[in-house]
Amino acid sequence: MISTMYQNRRTRLFNALPNKSFVIISGYQQKVRSKNIKYHFRQDNDFLYLTGFNEPDAVALLYCDESKDTGYSYTLLCRPKDEAQEVSFGARAGVLGALSQYGADDAFDIAELEQVLLSKLTDHANLFISDELGRFSSQVIGWLNHQRLNCSFDTIKQHRTLTPLAKVLHPMRVIKSSHEIDKIKAAVHASTAGHIAVMRACKPGVNEGLLSASFNFAISQYGCSEVAYPNIVASGNNACCLHYEENCCNLADGQMLLIDAGGELEHYASDITRTYPVNGKFNEAQRDIYQLVLNALDAAIDKVKPGANWNSLYETCMEVMAKGLLELGLLSGNIDDIMKDESYKRFTVHKTGHWLGMDVHDVGPYHDENGQWRKLESGMVFTIEPGIYIPLSATDIPEKYRGMGIRIEDDILVTQNGFENLSAGVPRTIGEIESIMSPID
């Protein structure tokens, strides 16, 4: 079944390409951390999406072949079997495994890449490449022109075009299959446990790093051996840095804690943010800003349904937060002028969502072919994450609000009739948060 899933993806991709197409998909190589110590390997998502092959140093070729029922051939080049290397670093599929386990029509040692590629790249006129890290950037032009420069003068010349495969593949990845949705839901479920564990461990004097480790421990019990991105565990003014990763400070009574963390399960990400008082009880200023952000999030979520405009979610968040900031006296003027001159951006700082999938900021366009904001469709998964940030340096703002960054983020699935909030199980209302953070007698 899994092998068929990858075959179906390749077929769908190839059917979207022009005649005489040739596709090169580069996997990632393993990175060295220090001397002979390597980082844990993670495969390129486009490569994995199309092949399911999760070993370093591999390349896949797809090319027009009218003799095949599918209309294309699939060649996989990978590391050969090597007993000594496998004893030290783990088993390899090898060339035979590429054929028997991964459904390749042909398979070769990766050392033969150029020879094999040029032998297959015969009269193909349209070359598509996926090479995120530029592994073959110095070679691809030579491949493109090889036939033209190495044939006799009276042979038909191949003047090939070169196109990033992302142009065709990434729009395909925006709509998630039921298999992908199940994986994302599982990652969110694990992360729900992680966030609840951090809420229960949070108290004055605890270190941000300990809370980060608590999250990682909790998600590991649900099969997540990775996080989708480095945990952001930011107390007080640290939360005004959007991608704070130091996680090294001790929490102080009276501060808010922002935690943005998501587990990754079988290459599918979750992405959830919660913010709450370190001592478990909102004071008046914290309550005011928190409820304003939550109101914006809920208003945007309520807009989600097939056919809705993507940017309407951002616009809704900004309108709700601008009105609230005006009512609190943090903005001045009238709401029409505030919306027009976007003075709210001083406190709101960032956009309010992104696609979610194999990448935490998943691939795919946010505009249609006419440059208009994309309409939502069933099967899309994305975040909505409004925030308000008032740093200590904002000395013109009442002191009770300073040193506070509040962001709330949920993972949303578009369904046929509306939406499903996948992360609703992570406490989000003031009452829910205060209840779960209350000391157990």
Image (tube, rainbow, N blue to C red):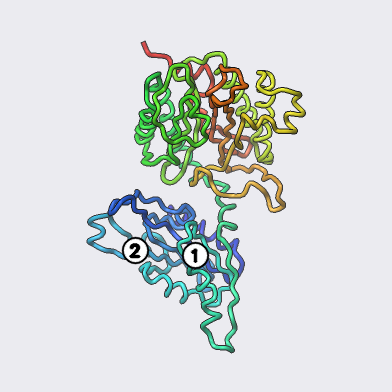
Decide which of 14, 295 is in the foreground and name it: 295
Q: Where does the image place residue 396, in percent across and percent down from the top left? A: 62, 22
Quadrant holding the C terminus: top left
Tell me the quarter of the picture where residue 198 sits: top left
Q: Nearer the viewer, residue 399 or 414?
A: 399
User: What is the residue that sits farthest to the top in this orientation?
Assistant: 441
Separation of marks 1 and 2 at Cα, in angstroms: 21 Å
Q: Name the residue under label 1.
A: 137
Question: Which residue is rendered at x = 59% and y = 81% of the image?
Answer: 157
Q: What residue type is labelled 1?
A: Ser
Disc 2 on helix, strand or loop?
loop
Image position of 234 with respect to 229: above or below = above
- Asked whether 154 or 180 is in front, the reply is 154
Residue 325 location (% of width, % of height): 66, 23
Instruction: Check the image and report above or below for 313 versus 179.
Output: above
Q: Earlier in the sequence, mark 1 or mark 2?
A: 2
Q: Position of residue 382 (x, y in %)?
A: 56, 39
